[in-house]
Image (cartoon, coloured by chain):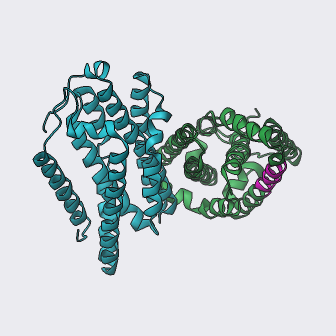
Chain colours: A cyan, B green
Amino acid sequence: MTDLGPPASALDTDPEYRAAVVDLFGVLAYGELTAFERLAADAAMAPTIDDKAALAGMATAEYRHFVVIRDRLVEMGVDPQQAMTPFRRAYEDFHEHTAPSDWLEGMVKAYVGDGIGMDFYREIANFVDEDSRALVVSVCDDLGQSAFIVERVRAAINEDPRVGGRLALWGRRLVGEALSQAQRVAADRDALSTLLVGGVDRPGTDLAEIGRMLARLTENHARRMSALGLAA
Amino acid sequence: MTDLGPPASALDTDPEYRAAVVDLFGVLAYGELTAFERLAADAAMAPTIDDKAALAGMATAEYRHFVVIRDRLVEMGVDPQQAMTPFRRAYEDFHEHTAPSDWLEGMVKAYVGDGIGMDFYREIANFVDEDSRALVVSVCDDLGQSAFIVERVRAAINEDPRVGGRLALWGRRLVGEALSQAQRVAADRDALSTLLVGGVDRPGTDLAEIGRMLARLTENHARRMSALGLAA
């Protein structure tokens, strides 16, 4: 992992850096809260009570992650609602444009959509101080969703291979929509963008490194699609 | 609290009693799981991020209750999914017939519907052994929903008194639907019904006591409606 973050003291001395970290925690916190909602909605669509219970448990874990970030914001003297509000619209548009039409689409969304989101936040974590990075990495943990979802989706494709074509298209649509919302957030939130491109006293990164980061994100996405038995 | 329950050893010696307790845990567990789902869906409708976070927290607490009962079923050597399945239909019909059309109806449903459910389960707990009773009582705890919901609903009525009339009708509809599903469960599940009316070696209760129980349920319901500022 590249370490490009400033020391933690920058949170007190560099207002632009502080604003960037507050943005990062805000977008992550709201992401966890909507992940909770979405997994709970998936639980409501679950075919069996065991699946329902499993997804409810995952939703609960996302909520605990939300609490961890919210508490950190409070520690920093920031109103969590205020930190999350700028990102509400992007998440809501994303979810509105990618409402799963059935349980399997919900599962692919939870795996592929959250996967690329978590990868992205982990990449960004390279550009923040150690404490902030540890927090981001801890809430980006896989909570056991992956194994559960991979098993369920592969079983469905085995049973009816045509499902695979439909879900592959769905996976591509998810990524396209996620990218378009990410671009919107980057354009709206200057502080957050300076984490990558740098600011006063912070080096940021160069185009070559951004290219490598995008390559890593793309590779990981392709690996997830293939784990599900889907063409990326 | 009247103590009409047998000793815990009856779980091993009286198969009908054991079946009744498994039914009770099954209906409670599925109830907690659907309470989780419903509060999570309310969170998705919440007007502010703070409300969203508060409801997500309550949903998570319901899920923890679910886990407590599920674990007890497993301890008893019972498959939780099998114990819950007989009650799935009644809950689903209840929720289908009482889908809230907005956030306020969702709040009244969480308070009034769960309230009467929890009261009922606490009454039934009088007829089981001490350990089982302690479990039921612990998961019937108010998780802080009440204060939050009362405040939100009263504020909405203050702002627009016409809301009160609509929500009062809604509260009555909820109780009617809950009663009709409870009757269906009672008719379907003989073992569960014998908790009240008695079985071999178990006295059960008499009509006068059942009358008093219904009076208590009705009074508590009226008290909740009035706490919300609604005519029962």
Which quadrant would residue B189 be assigned to in this image?
Answer: bottom right
Q: Quadrant of the C terminus of chain A?
A: bottom left
* Residue B17 magenta-highlighted: no
Between A222 and A97, the one nearer to me in the picture: A97
Q: Is residue B103 above or below residue A98?
A: above
Give the residue furthest to the left: A208
Prevailing secondary structure class for the magenta stretch in the rendered image:
helix
B175 magenta-colored: yes
Question: Bounds of the magenta span?
Answer: B165-176
Q: Residue at x 31, y 61 (%)?
A: A175
x 32%, y 63%: residue: A176
- Asked whether, in this view, residue A140 is left or right of residue A213, the answer is right
Residue A203 lies, in percent from the top left, at 15, 32
Which residue is nearer to you in this view: A198 or B217?
A198
Tag count in the figure?
A: 0
Please state the horizontal and vertical placement of residue B28, each as a whole percent of the image. 61, 49
Vertical order, B132 against B174 (above or below): above
In the image: residue B185, left or right of residue A43: right
Specify whether B156 is left or right of B17.
right
Q: Residue at 68% of width from left, 32% of height from top?
A: B147
For the N terminus of chain A, the quadrant is top left
Q: Is residue B90 left or right of residue A217?
A: right
In percent of width and height, residue B140 lies at 64, 39
Q: Nearer the viewer, residue A219 or B215?
A: A219
Q: Position of residue A231 (x, y in %)?
A: 23, 71
In which quadrant of the rendered view does residue B19 lie?
bottom right
Residue A50 showing in the rendered view: no
- Which is nearer the eye, B118 or B160? B160
The reply to whether residue A47 is in sight is yes
Residue extending farthest to the front is A200
